[in-house]
Amino acid sequence: MSVSGGVLVGGIDLGDPVLTQIARQGLEDVERRLAIELDDYDERVLDAVSHLSRAGGKCFRSLFTLLAAQFGPGADDPQVVLAAAMIEIAHLATLYHDDVMDGALVRRGVHSANAMWDNKIAVLAGDYLIGRVLRIAAALGEHAMDIIGVTFTELVAGQMQETMGAPAETDPEAHYWITIRRKTSVLIAAAGQLGAQLAGARKEHIDCLYRFGDLLGTMFQISDDIIDVSSDFEQSGKAIGTDLREGIITLPMLYAMRDDSPAGRRLREVLHGPIDDPRLVDEALFLINEAQGVKLAAQKLVELGGQAQSDLLQLPENPARQAFSNLIQHMATRVA
């Protein structure tokens, strides 16, 4: 994680210089907390469990926790930083497990843990991180434990639903929306909820930030899905076409398969399960773009951004609200 200049994490300009400095300091505190929490006397364990943290990352979820705390009187409470670190560790745990499931060789521009060691070590490293999350949640109190328990349950259920695919009687797009909410949105929503709650925000604002985080998480996943079929390694630090190889149907694919053009019809023939042949992967990527799948998914992203901007009006006007507005704009145009 790196923070420098007037622009904060991942190129997101928070707008207000005072808030930028507060958030910069908060993320530096989170980084120090991560180093404490991911420490272990066995250097081999330490290397494995801190591998992805050391590789860097945008720490988007930690930032969201810190910004949500700005809607309460206790934004500088040390528990807010602890919660932000906990949320980041929870996210890291899911990355270790995701890479094993996907057989991914690259994460954050470096070798994934399963490629660096093996699947067993990667799974155990993820489990280790979950243990750390539970310890922090216990320190934060019963309500934090409840939030984290619900969040992990939803994360796993959503991942299972995605892996199993849509039931025969279920509309694929409806299945997609349910799945991404559970496997992605819920952790971002929890980040906003915890940050606001630990800072002593009013209940209606806590609830609003949870809903806003849920919507922002949906946008984040759609953005990731677009990147997976239209970006490249230099931009994203991840291999392109991962979902195609896993047989996972995402929004750009769903939109492209609806197209009645030759590209759409051919795509429906190709997407009948996981694709192992690199030539078919390349063809599918071309067809998804040719059949307007990426364009339509990007339009949906902009539409959701408008909805999120409207939801923000329910929050008090302050620099953090403007920062969230900037964050929505960043999300709608994000390419990596």
Image (spheres, helix red, strand yellow):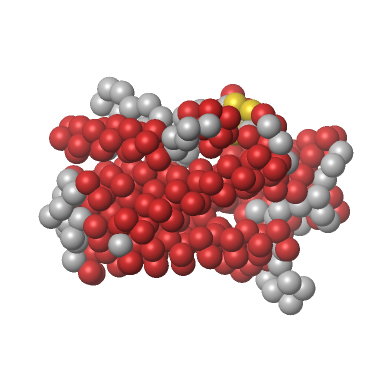
Left or right: 78, with 232 as reference point:
left
Looking at the picture, tell me which residue is in the foreground, 333 or 210. Answer: 210
x 43%, y 56%: residue? 134
x 30%, y 32%: residue? 28
x 69%, y 74%: residue? 170
* Residue 253 shows up from this direction: yes
Residue 208 to residue 49: above or below: below
x 39%, y 48%: residue? 86
Looking at the picture, tell me which residue is in the foreground, 313 or 207. Answer: 207
Q: Position of residue 118 (x, y in %)?
A: 71, 36
Q: Position of residue 243 (x, y in %)?
A: 70, 47
Location of residue 139 (image quadrant): bottom left
Left or right: 327, with 92 as reference point:
left
The residue furthest left is 73
Residue 153 to residue 199: above or below: below
Q: Quadrant of the N terminus?
A: top left
Left or right: 259, with 56 as reference point:
right
Looking at the picture, tell me which residue is in the foreground, 94 or 42. Answer: 42
* Residue 192 shows up from this direction: no
Q: Position of residue 80 (x, y in %)?
A: 26, 49
The residue furthest front is 41
Q: Position of residue 59 (x, y in %)?
A: 41, 39
The residue furthest bottom is 169
Residue 90 to residue 115: above or below: below
Left or right: 287, with 73 as reference point:
right
Looking at the picture, tell me which residue is in the foreground, 160 or 320. Answer: 160
